[in-house]
């Protein structure tokens, strides 16, 4: 029984790669829908269904699933649950609920041994939520710095798409339209079936006044230090003007 359970979880983990690596929540929903027999129960299937819905832009549906039931702190998917729940509240601009989740995770971190896996999970979730909260509070400069750090550490394509679009939004707010548009081009090319693509297309039009059309195939962004150099040059040009 343990072996069969382990094999099942390994198979489900492999299926979940279509989201993290392929940025394809539509396919993820197709994979997990036949397995979704008890939506009122929280487990790895329920979690992946909520992810699939959220990343397609179906935030209300994802929230409906997530708020039906929640895992206890011993559940192996506890932090993943609060990760996707925080993403939902970020999309619905619910700062109060984001702050409540942050307080909950800070409390857990405060009673957890440093350098443990659980402590690292707490810190990762708190770092991500800090970006959401700073953005909601209009603290653009510290939000950009925090977002740059997360973008450098991002190990999955989905994470890079997520933080790249956030950076584009922040750069647009600070007047760096050219750099914002370049990031949007990357999101449009690599964002798969996520809602990030539509948002990037809309933001690109705001920055450039036209639709994005790849000139020679897919767009590949430069390294993060090159982004910073390009942004610095753009800001210098604005000051000279």
Image (tube, helix red, strand yellow):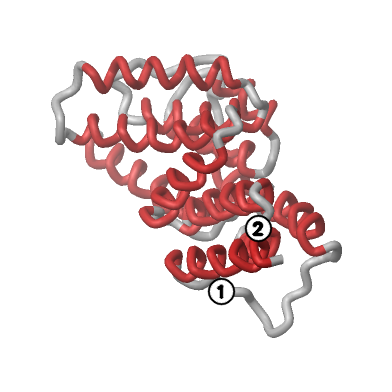
Q: Position of residue 234 (x, y in %)?
A: 62, 66
Looking at the image, which is closer to me, 139 or 48?
A: 139
Q: Which image quarter: residue 125? A: top left
Question: For the residue labelled by badge 1, is the local secondary structure a helix, a strand or a loop?
Answer: loop
Q: Above or below — where is 121 with respect to 209?
A: above
Q: Residue at x 24, y 30 (%)?
A: 118
Numbered mark located on residue 220 in the image? 1
Image quadrant occupied by the C terminus: bottom right
The mark that comes first in sequence, 1 or 2, is 2
Mark 1–mark 2 contact, CB under 8 Å?
Answer: no
Numbered mark located on residue 7 in the image? none
Q: In front of the other: label 1 or label 2?
A: 2
Question: For the residue labelled by badge 2, is the local secondary structure a helix, a strand or a loop?
Answer: loop
Q: Position of residue 220 (x, y in %)?
A: 56, 74
Name the residue beneath numbered marker 2. Answer: 176
In the image, taking residue 196 as reference, residue 47 lies left or right, namely: left
């Amino acid at each position: 029984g343990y072996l069969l359970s382990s094999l099942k979880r390994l198979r489900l983990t492999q299926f979940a790669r279509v989201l993290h690596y392929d940025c394809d929540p539509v396919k993820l929903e197709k994979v997990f829908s036949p397995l979704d027999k008890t939506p009122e129960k929280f487990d790895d299937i329920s979690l992946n269904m909520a992810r699939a819905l959220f990343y397609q832009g179906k935030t209300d549906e994802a929230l409906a699933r997530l708020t039906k039931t929640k895992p206890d702190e011993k559940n192996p998917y506890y932090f993943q649950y609060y990760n996707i729940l925080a993403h939902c509240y970020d999309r619905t601009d619910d700062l109060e609920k984001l702050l409540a989740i942050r307080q909950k995770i800070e409390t857990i971190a405060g009673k957890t041994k440093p350098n443990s896996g659980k402590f690292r999970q707490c810190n990762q979730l708190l770092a991500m939520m800090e970006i959401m909260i700073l953005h909601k509070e209009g603290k653009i400069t510290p939000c950009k710095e925090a977002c740059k750090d997360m973008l450098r550490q991002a190990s999955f394509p989905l994470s890079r798409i997520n933080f790249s679009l956030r950076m584009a939004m922040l750069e647009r707010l600070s007047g760096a339209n050219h750099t914002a548009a370049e990031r949007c081009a990357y999101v449009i090319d690599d964002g798969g079936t996520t809602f990030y693509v539509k948002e990037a297309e809309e933001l690109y039009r705001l920055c450039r006044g036209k639709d994005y059309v790849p000139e020679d195939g897919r767009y590949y962004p430069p390294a993060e230090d090159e982004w910073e150099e390009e942004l610095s040059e753009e800001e210098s040009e604005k000051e000279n003007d």
